[in-house]
Image (spheres, rainbow, N blue to C red):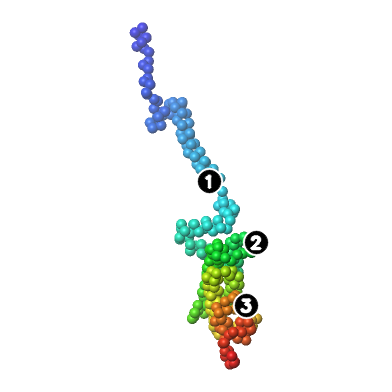
Amino acid sequence: DEAMESSSPTPEPAARRPRCLDSRLPGPDAEDPVAAVINSVSAGRRAGGGRKRVRAADSASSKEVCLDKLLEPLEEKDLRLLLDTLVAQNPQLAAQVRQLVPKPTVNSACSQLVRLERRLLAAFPYNKAGPALDEYTYHRVRPALEELRDTIVMYLDHFTHYGLQPLAASTTLSHPAEWFDLLNQATDVAARMPKWDRPEHNAIRRDTLRQLAAGWLRAITAAARWTEGGHIVGRDMLTRWAQQLGRFYSGAGEPALFEPAVQAFRCSFGEHCSNAAASRSNCVLPGTAA
């Protein structure tokens, strides 16, 4: 028995591991094929796990909706709010946005004025007898009225900046037809502003017409200077401007505001001045009697 016990192998401690199963320790895999398979499978699983995570990330990104499809269902006001928010959070984008946005034209400006006028009318509370012009209604629609006024003045300043400023010496003037086209349509919108029961509530309307009348005066002065520089303005065009000015002079309810423009037009282009516009003018044309 003692001989048998001495010849039996000594059992290996449980904590001892084959060197080849520990990836941190070098070991000849060829000497232990089972350990080599285990190590290769473990390495494959670790590498495969990384690939799965990459595939999962790619799959998540491929499920994102395209930006143009996200923007497509948004309404105009939502897009404008989104753009305003982006510019407010990133002021450096303002200059780039201005370069990308098409420059306003007289037609686009007047179309916007018409839209704002419709918004103003829509702000009136419903009344079976028609829009009320009392104090409550005035305060109800005042924000829309002020927005319309501010937009008219903004476009007036924009389109009359070059060549229509007093004593402007610029030689690169656009054709005056653009100025008068804007003035005619903008003044038409302003003349349709509501006349309120209380006179003090008509201040916004009167202020808008005052600034437009001043724009007419600047345009007439610039057009006269334009023709003195050798440019030609057609007779039909001058007659049309005179008729438009005469209509606002007699129909806007503020003849005193348009009186200086009427006088300037008659002095510069008197033979084309309509009777309505010239009826109260005291301007003496060169070489003629009053």
As displayed, is residue 36 above or below residue 199? above
Out of 6 and 189, give the one closest to the viewer: 189
For disc 3, the marked residue is 247
Residue 61's tag is 1
| Mark 1 to mark 3 CA distance (whole Å) | 63 Å
Residue type highlighted by circle 3: Arg
Label 3 vs label 2, nearer the camera: 2
Q: Position of residue 64 (x, y in %)?
A: 55, 47
Residue 128's tag is 2
Image quarter in which the N terminus is found: top left
| Mark 3 to mark 2 CA distance (whole Å) | 31 Å
Residue type highlighted by circle 1: Ser
Element assignment for label 1? helix
Q: Position of residue 164 (x, y in %)?
A: 52, 77
**Left or right for 229, reference 276:** left
Element assignment for label 2? loop
Out of 96 and 131, give the one closest to the viewer: 131
As displayed, is residue 290 above or below residue 248? below
Q: Residue at x 54, y 81 (%)?
A: 260
Label 1 vs label 3, nearer the camera: 3
As displayed, is residue 125 above or below residue 31? below
Q: Residue at x 43, y 29 (%)?
A: 29
Element assignment for label 3? helix
Q: Residue at x 34, y 11 (%)?
A: 6
C-beta proximity under 8 Å, tags 3 and 2: no
As displayed, is residue 104 above or below residue 50? below
Q: Which of the two labelled residues, at mark 3 and mark 2, occupies the earlier sequence position?
A: 2
